[in-house]
Image: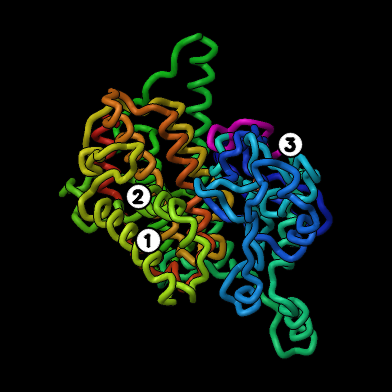
Amino acid sequence: MEPNEVDVNKATSAGHPGLKLLIPEDIRYNCQGCGRCCSGWSVGLTEEDYGRVKGTDWQSLHPELAGKEIFFHREKEFAEGTAAYPHYTKPRDDGSCPFLINNLCFIHSTLGEYEKPITCRVFPYSFVETPTGVYTGVVYNSMASVRNIGEPLSAQREKLTEYFNLSIQHKNASMRPGELDAQIKAVQDGSMVAPVSPFDKVKITPACELTWEEYLLIEDRMISLVLSRLRNLDIKTSAEVLEGRPHVQNEGTAGSGANIFNTLLQCGEILMQGRKLKVSGGNVADIASFEPEIKIPAEPQASGTELMTLRMLYYRFFVYPTVRTSDTSLWQMQRKRAFEPKVAITVAKAFSKYIGSGLNTILMAKAGLPLLGNVSLNTALSKDFAPIDDETDKLFHRWLYLKLFSKSYFGPAAAGFSVLSGFNCLTASILSVLLFAKAAAINKKAEAIAIADIYEAYWRLDRELLTMGQTPEQESKFYNSGLSSPRLFNKSIWTMAGSLKL
Ligand code: SF4
């Protein structure tokens, strides 16, 4: 093994009996109290969560809560299986949580940390259970995690163990009445086979299945590549800091230099080689010595379908959530009520907003957000800017490493995506973040992309990846099949890299 390679199976263990908690390297997070993760969604509460807070007369405790409805209830729908939780917090009109007061959680400051809904306590940490252990991570819907601020996760083992146990407790408490008992009884009396890990088999493409061990070999090769780039960038930027020099701009070309575009293209080739070894009956372990080569496409222009798929994902990450959070009445509406004549006008108005913004972004290629002005996404993709700096390149590599390590981009943690669809979604995410930041720069008439716009785009993006990952598998089939082509966004990568002179 090369010195900069990582054997993920030997990553840190929390030392909890029977629990192998695997923690990514050099990933940091501690809450900085910005309050931004407390908006954009209704927090789901289990009966246990609700039981801890329902006895408090919140409206009498703070003028901001006086006379406000702070919860809405879906007990019947939860029992029927059409709602994920029996209770929810009712967001304000701007989408923020009703308990967020002066950027602090009012439940936390009134009753204490332990009384908050478990979802809020555990956020933004993620836990994915697999046959080789529980892989931890953080999502970037927090400015502290986007900026990698705080204690390394490797120094937070006790907390991670506690939060993992809480997340299991939460998962059990989220089950419908009697569901858990019925499952245990069925396994005991033999009428149901004990569930095997959903990761025992991994679909690298919708038609090609790997064992978990084979998947880890391929992932290990990709992680080694990403980490070696990340370490080189760390060494380079530390030297610049020591010498008092500003961060230099990235060097090289997409084909030969070490930058995020090169990394995405090479990781895509590693995935394809892994699949080839499997379908040809070769030894998947040979992937360890595979050196991915990148070829400049003969026809460099992305096709209309490729660009439209990219814009569709850009819409899903950035525009759709803005429309969704702008209409809290529809957001909280029970699905079956959407067909009632009484609410027909509200539903029709909301749908016209979705359709209008969708056409504007996907077909007309407009950036689609007031923050970004009326900028064309086609212009944003190809317009030349100064190369991204090393800090931005590090951010992209760190995020890619985190997604790969935490196993949150495919399979059960991502609504059943195949590995290839999940990886294409990660590629589209990085391109979309850059489209967002370039559109912002065009709108501001700036000559370079601002890292603050990259942070903002990531904060928005990761919340949507999280919610996409929680959609029922049936609903995610549309994305899964649309993203399952090999090298789907390669031409867009080349265009973006060329525009940044990389
Ligand atoms: S309950 Fe508290 S921690 Fe949870 S979203 Fe609301 S303000 Fe934030």
Q: Earlier in the sequence, mark 1 or mark 3?
A: 3
Q: Earlier in the sequence, mark 2 or mark 1?
A: 2
x, y percentage for residue 447? Answer: 28, 23
Please check the rendered image and state whether residue 152 is part of the magenta-colored stretch, yes or no: yes
In the rendered image, is residue 270 in sight?
Answer: no
Alpha-carbon span between mark 3 and mark 2: 35 Å
Left or right, residue 36 beside residue 119: left
Task: Name the amino acid, label 3.
Answer: Ala
Q: Is residue 318 above or below residue 192?
A: above
Q: On the rendered image, what quadrant is the C terminus found in?
A: top left
Left or right, residue 96 beside residue 75: left
Q: Give the residue number, with chain letter if any, for mark 3.
A: 155
Alpha-carbon neighbours of circle 3 within 10 Å: few (<14), some, or many (≥20)?
few
Q: Give the residue number, with chain letter if any, for mark 2.
A: 314
x, y percentage for residue 37? Answer: 58, 43
Alpha-carbon neighbours of circle 2 within 10 Å: few (<14), some, or many (≥20)?
many
Q: On the rendered image, what quadrant is the N terminus found in?
A: top right
In the rendered image, is residue 439 in sight?
Answer: yes
